[in-house]
Amino acid sequence: MSIRQTTGDVKKIEGRLRFPDLASFLFVLGFVMALIGIFGGVLALHALSAFAFLSSLIVSILRKDLHMICLAFSFTIATALGVYQGMNPVEFKIPLVAHP
């Protein structure tokens, strides 16, 4: 095997790793933004994390990576529902003391 064949193989492998790395990067970025948004109380950051998860989902679909598709899809739905809940809070009226 010559040096050219080895370099060509390495370039081919690096080309394959770009899209999964992009999907993983977007997913981790969305996860960090979601944590800061939830615990910091910043709804806009929480909403941006939904877009990061959605971008990760699109890249995963283009790459046909089933594991990342399932992961990004579930986090996209969960984050979107969390943002919706943050925008429209539901008040639960549960009595603390039972009245006769």
Image (cartoon, rainbow, N blue to C red):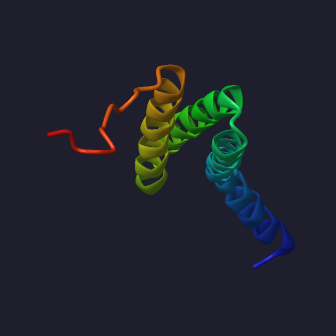
Residue 37 sits in which quadrant?
Answer: top right
In the foreground, 52 or 2: 52
- Considering every residue shown, the one lying at the far left of the view is 100
The residue depicted at 40 percent of the width and 28 percent of the height is 91
In the foreground, 96 or 59: 96
The residue depicted at 64 percent of the width and 52 percent of the height is 24
Residue 4, image x and y in percent?
83, 66
- Considering every residue shown, the one lying at the far top of the view is 88
Residue 19, image x and y in percent?
64, 46
In the foreground, 83 or 41: 41
In the foreground, 28 or 63: 28
Q: In this view, does 26 lie above or below 85?
A: below
Q: Is residue 67 above or below residue 53?
A: below
Q: Is residue 3 above or below residue 36?
A: below
The residue depicted at 30 percent of the width and 38 percent of the height is 95
Q: In which quarter of the image is the N terminus?
A: bottom right
The residue depicted at 42 percent of the width and 36 percent of the height is 77
How many marks the image carries: the answer is: 0
Q: Is residue 8 left or right of residue 93?
A: right
